[in-house]
Image: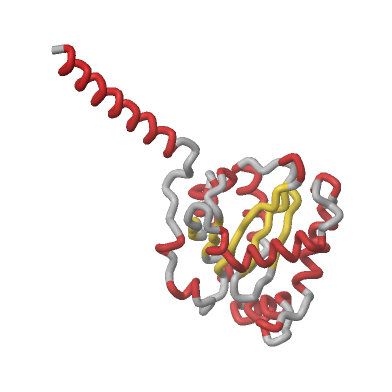
Amino acid sequence: MKGELKKIALVELRQRGKARNVRQETRGKIRDMVLIDERPKEIEGRIVPGHWEGDLIIGDGHKSALSVIVERQTRYVMIERLLSYDATTVRKSIEKRFKSIEPELRKSITCDQGKEMAEHKQFSKNMRMKVYFCNPHSPWEKGTCENTNFLIRDMCRDITDFRNLTQQQAHRIAKLLNERPRQTLGFRTPKEKLSQLCAKSC
């Protein structure tokens, strides 16, 4: 009898342990994500403009961040300095920048699974843009933004706490990158390529 009770107790403990593990694995995850695996092939091939990638570059002490969004086809980048990067702040910041872009060039954005994108459904509703998420620990899946982040870090090498960077300086960095000829663009600049697309959409 004691042996049977022990077996039952062990089974119940294992089941409770599994239940606890399930709760721990789902805790903090963003709900209703659409993964990058479901993204149309036309986005991957940069065939159609208007598909963006987004990320945060976190400053020292996690006290500030640079919010980066970059268009995949033209490599056009917009940067915003944030003194906090909660989900609402990040959403409103990205929405503000996208409102300066022609609606025809606002189709989708691909991001990491960071909690700053927890309001992705509200963003998608407000901007009428689809949001895709990279797989966990797979930043290379948004390689355009990763490459852009590298350039931004290089330009900010002496400023690692972005509280010491003004909004004007952040915009200046974006301007320099957007006016820099790129071999991959036939030595045109991202600004020129985006302007061409804007002219076509008018």
Residue 12: give x, y in percent of width and height: 25, 23
Q: Is residue 14 above or below residue 158?
A: above
Residue 67: give x, y in percent of width and height: 69, 53
Residue sitting at x 60%, y 43% = 87
Left-right relation of 48 to 153: left
Out of 77 and 199, give the one closest to the viewer.
77
Residue sitting at x 59%, y 66% = 143
Out of 25 and 68, give the one closest to the viewer.
25
Out of 202 and 111, give the one closest to the viewer.
111
- Which quarter of the figure has residue 23? top left
Q: Is residue 143 above or below residue 8?
A: below
Q: Looking at the image, which residue sits at the far left?
A: 1
The quadrant in which the C terminus is found is bottom right
Residue sitting at x 30%, y 23% = 13
Q: Looking at the image, which residue sits at the far front?
A: 3
Residue sitting at x 59%, y 62% = 53
- Which quarter of the figure has residue 187? bottom right
Q: Is residue 113 above or below residue 19?
A: below
Residue 80: give x, y in percent of width and height: 73, 54
- Which quarter of the figure has residue 189? bottom right
Q: Looking at the image, which residue sits at the far top?
A: 2
